[in-house]
Amino acid sequence: MRVGFGFDVHRLVQGRKLILGGVEIPYEYGLLGHSDADVATHALIDALLGAAGLGDIGEHFPDTDERYRDVSSLELLKETMQLLKKEGLVPLNADLTIVCERPKLKPYKDQMRQRLAQALGLSPFQVNIKAKTTEGLGFTGRQEGIATYAVVLLDHAA
Ligand code: MG
């Protein structure tokens, strides 16, 4: 089995949609980025690539590539799953911690689990989403951005 870790940060700005874990969340600010800037899915992708020994998200989906402008990060996650499949690797579970002062993410966690699990070929039970604040401290506390940490476990396909 192989473990992988991922981390990502995106800046919160006006005039962008807020997409986290493949779910659009109504909010006055959204995340800035070349794709849909889904910071949770990006951290998950990096965890998967890390566990597979396949580098990082920037190598596979560069932000200079017009194909990835405003793309749904769930599509990038699905492409990542194809890379893993070629290596004969399958995920066993994923665990994400989204660091976000506002908005409150509790109402959206189950939907994120379902979206991510579907893209990973897992049941929602195998994907866990945790939402944390930093008690007002740091850039997440000042609501300048949202961060996510993710770990996954991979196994060789049967
Ligand atoms: Mg990112």
Image: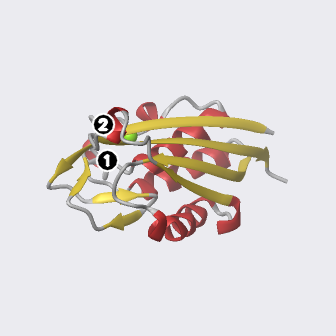
Determine which of the numbered discs, if any, sits on residue 143 in the image. none
Crowd around label 2: few <14 · some 14–19 · many ≥20 (10 Å)? some
Residue at 30% from the left image edge and 58% from the top image edge: 18
Q: Secondary structure at mark 2?
A: loop
Front-most of 85 and 9?
9
Residue at 59% from the left image edge and 51% from the top image edge: 81
Q: Position of residue 34 (x, y in %)?
A: 26, 43
Q: Amino acid at mark 1?
A: Tyr
Q: Can residue 112 be seen at all in this image of the molecule?
A: yes
Name, please, the residue furthest toward the front: 135
Q: CA distance from mark 2 to mark 1?
A: 7 Å
Front-most of 132 and 26?
132
Q: Quadrant of residue 19?
A: bottom left
Q: Amino acid at mark 2?
A: Asp
Q: Position of residue 142 (x, y in %)?
A: 28, 40
Front-most of 76 and 141?
141
Q: Position of residue 128 (x, y in %)?
A: 63, 57
Quarter of the figure that contains the C terminus: bottom right
Looking at the image, do the residues carrying marks 2 and 1 touch, with CB atoms under 8 Å apart? yes
* Depicted 121 relative to depicted 67: above or below: below
* Depicted 132 relative to depicted 46: above or below: below
Q: Earlier in the sequence, mark 2 or mark 1?
A: 2
Q: Can residue 10 be seen at all in this image of the molecule?
A: no
Q: Quadrant of ligand 1?
A: top left
Crowd around label 1: few <14 · some 14–19 · many ≥20 (10 Å)? some
* Depicted 107 relative to depicted 96: above or below: below
* Residue that numbered label 1 is attached to: 68
Residue at 46% from the left image edge and 58% from the top image edge: 21
Q: Secondary structure at mark 1?
A: helix
Name, please, the residue furthest toward the left: 15
* Residue that numbered label 2 is attached to: 63
